[in-house]
Structure formats: C-alpha cells, structure tokens
Image (tube, helix red, strand yellow):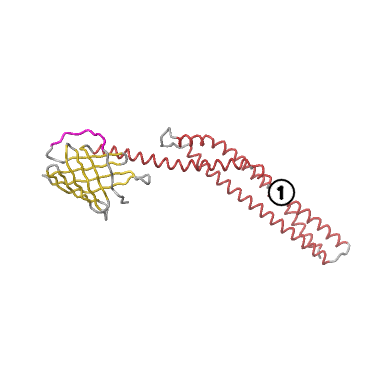
Amino acid sequence: MRKVWGLALVLLSVVVAPVQAASLSGTYVGTGPDIAVLLQLVDSGGQLTGRYEQVKLSSSEPTLNRLDAGIKGTVDGDTIVFEMKPTELLSSNSIISGTVASNVLRLTGGGNGATFNLNLMRSSEDAFNSQVATLANQVSQISATRTLTTDAKALEAISQRMVAFGVRAESELKKVKPFEDRFQLQTNAMQSALTQQRNLMQGGGSVAIRSQINGAIYRAGGESFQIHAALQSAHAEFESKSIAILNDTNGLLKKCQSPISIAANSDLLSAWKSRCEQLPSVATNFRNQATQMLKSFAHAEAVWQEEDRKQQTIMKSSDVAAR
C-alpha cells in the first residue's frame, strides 16, 4: 500500500569507511527512531544510477511501510541532483538535490505530496538491515501490546461475569425448583378434576358437565406443556451462556500460558499475569456452580417426564369419563 514518504531524519553515528573523494559510488545509510534509509549509488564520471530503499514505522498501525525506487542523476563538485522513480505502479517521481561533504549526503526534495529531508552517511547495507530489524521488533512489540490490551480486557470481563454468577448462584438455583412444584400441582389439580368427573359419571351426572371437566383437564395439560417449554428455554439459555463463558475462558487460559513478547517490567504485563493467576480458581468455581445448575435443570426435566406421564394417563381416563 502506497504511503506518504515525508520524513525528518536524525542520523546515528556509524563507522565511516575510507573512500576516494572523487567518487560517490557506495552505500549511504540514514537511521532514526522510526525509519531506516538506504541509498546505493554508482558514480560513472558524474552520472549517477542506483537505488533507494526506505522502511518507516507507520504512525497509525503496527506495520512497516516500504518505498523502493530507482535513482538516476548527476553530481557536479559537491552538488548532487537525481530523480527518484518508485517501483510501485502509478507512483509519481520525486526530484532530490543536495550537497556532498565528508562522506555525508544532505538531501532535500520531493514530489506529489512527498517530502524528503535526508542526512545520509557512507556506511554498509548491514547497518541498514540492522535498523530494519530494530523497526520490525518495534512492530512486534506494538502488535503484542495491542493484542495483550484486548485480551486483558476480555480476561477481566470474563472473570467478572463468572464471579457475578457465583454471587447469585444460590438465587439462580432457586428458580428451577418452582418448575417442579408447578408440574406436580397441575397433576394434582387434574387428578382432582378426574375424581369429580368419575363421581358424576357414577351418579348419573350430566354428560355436558363431565365434558366441561374434560375440557378443563386438557387445558391444565396444555398449561403444563407451556410451563415445560419455559423450563426448556431457561435451560437452553443457561447452557448456551455457560458454554460460551467456558469456551472463552479456555481460550484465555491458553493465552495465559503462552509467552508474551512485550517489556517484562510493563504495568500491562504485570496486570495480565496477576489476572491469569486468578483465572483457574475462578473458572473452577464457575464450572462447579454451572454443573450444579445443570443438574438442577436435569432433575426438573425428570420431574416433568414423570408428571407428564401421569397427566397423559389422566387425560385418557377423562375422555372415558366424559362419555
């Protein structure tokens, strides 16, 4: 991706190799906190050719922006002028000029919005590559820090959710038992209605009244079905949420065990390690509470199955008593 190439460059000290003053042929390097520049020139009697390479740390994201360009120009005494033609398609050329003094090139110029202000010293490609490696390490550090910041927030959030559940675990468990009670109450009500219906049948009671009771029994069975649907919904919702929490927790536990490539003395890393140390016990408590909750749902389901069997029998008996 093409980026703006403007820069302000501060040179670090480098070892200067002896060179004949009459020729600019050689390698020139400039470095700064967020940039590395390489200029390789071939001086053929004042006619210059070569290549320009620039690696710069992006100010907005953890990445390195690169610029590669061909060089063609002239040198006359201590004055140098050349055209820089980027290898990237549809890129505009830049005109660079400056002076030569004591193995140092002082260059300025630009084109199409790009600005160059360069101080380059005669050096080696190894010096350039070393700075590029330093910049790449900065990218890794920035990327790792951003990732760890996101993971730390996720870790804190998931821990808070599990702790919060633990605080209300007892009240959550209490929500399941009423389902069992309602199933049994419906069965008892239906059984009482059936008894009334049979008594009417034995006493020669009205068929119409017995039919009304039969309808009431079926409506009670339908209410039981709705109660069971609500139980299943609550069960499914809890199971889905608890599985999601546990999956997120397992992912974070793995990250807690992975090496972190940021400064060992950073506050962020210290906070991350502290939360990671607490996570296993918090997760274990949550698993135990979630298991207890799921067992409670399973017990309520077993109660429903038993009461539903009874209610189905009552409804069939009511059909007979209604005739």
Give the residue pinned by disc 1: 178
Left or right relative to 113: residue 174: right
Count of number-bearing discs: 1
Provide the major secondary structure of the magenta segment: loop
x, y percent for residue 258: 45, 37
- Magenta part of the protein: which range? 11-20
Q: Quadrant of residue 291?
A: top right
Q: Quadrant of residue 220?
A: bottom right
Give whichever of 194, 185 is nearer the camera. 185
Q: Residues within 10 Å of mark 1 (few under 14, many from 20)?
A: few
Residue shown at the point (38%, 40%) measured from the top left: 140
Residue shown at the point (86%, 59%) measured from the top left: 199
x, y percent for residue 203: 89, 62
| Residue 15 part of the magenta-drawn span | yes
The secondary structure type at the circle numbered 1 is helix
Residue shown at the point (82%, 64%) measured from the top left: 210
**Which amino acid type is marked by label 1?**
Pro
x, y percent for residue 211: 80, 65
Left or right relative to 17: residue 163: right
Left or right relative to 267: residue 204: right
Give whichever of 63, 213 is nearer the camera. 63
| Residue 160 part of the magenta-drawn span | no
x, y percent for residue 22: 11, 39
Quadrant in which the C terminus appears:
bottom right
